[in-house]
Image (spheres, rainbow, N blue to C red):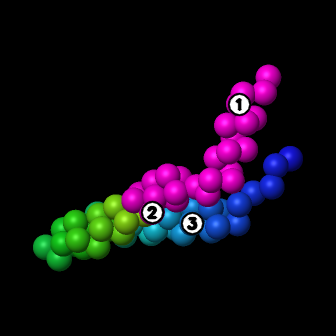
Amino acid sequence: MKTQNPHLTRRLRISGTLIIAGLIVQAGSLFWNRPLSFLLFVLVGSVVLTVGIVAYLFAIVTLPDKITENVVRSAEVP
């Protein structure tokens, strides 16, 4: 079993938490029948969800070179 990168794991957990929090805020605002609920849905929920998605993509793109070299080497060796 290969060792896991603790920095990548931490970043993915943070981004996953932000995505779940954004979805919970959006789902909660759907049950609230006030004009303010739309602002909560759009401003808070969408922003938190977008930040979580961007953090997830950023964590994947910025993998350390050592990990990407190991992945390339393991793909080359049959």
Residue on which disc 2 sits? 55
Badge 3 marks a residue whose secondary structure is helix
Q: Residue at x 54, y 69 (%)?
A: 14
| Residues packed near mark 1 inside 10 Å, few (<14), some (14 to 19) or many (20 plus) | few
Residue on which disc 1 sits? 75
Measured along the vertical axis of the image, is residue 34 above or below residue 50? below
User: Label 2 near label 1: C-beta < 8 Å?
Assistant: no
Mark 1 or 2, nearer chain start = 2
Residue on which disc 3 sits? 11
Quadrant assignment for the C terminus: top right
Quarter of the figure with residue 28: bottom left
Q: Amino acid at mark 2?
A: Ala
Quarter of the figure with residue 19: bottom left
Residue furthest to the top in view is 78
The answer for how far apart the CA atoms under marks 3 and 2 are is 7 Å
The answer for how far apart the CA atoms under marks 3 and 1 are is 25 Å
For the question of whether residue 26 can be seen, the reply is: no
Q: Residue at x 52, y 57 (%)?
A: 62
| Residues packed near mark 3 inside 10 Å, few (<14), some (14 to 19) or many (20 plus) | some
Q: Residue at x 18, y 68 (%)?
A: 38
- Asked if the magenta segment contains residue 72, the reply would be yes
Q: Amino acid at mark 1?
A: Ala
**Which contiguous range is marked in magenta?**
53-78
The answer for how far apart the CA atoms under marks 1 and 2 are is 27 Å
Considering the whole magenta stretch, tell me its main secondary structure.
helix
- Residue 12's x, y, as percent? 57, 61
Report the mark closest to the observer, 1 or 2: 1
User: Label 2 near label 3: C-beta < 8 Å?
Assistant: yes
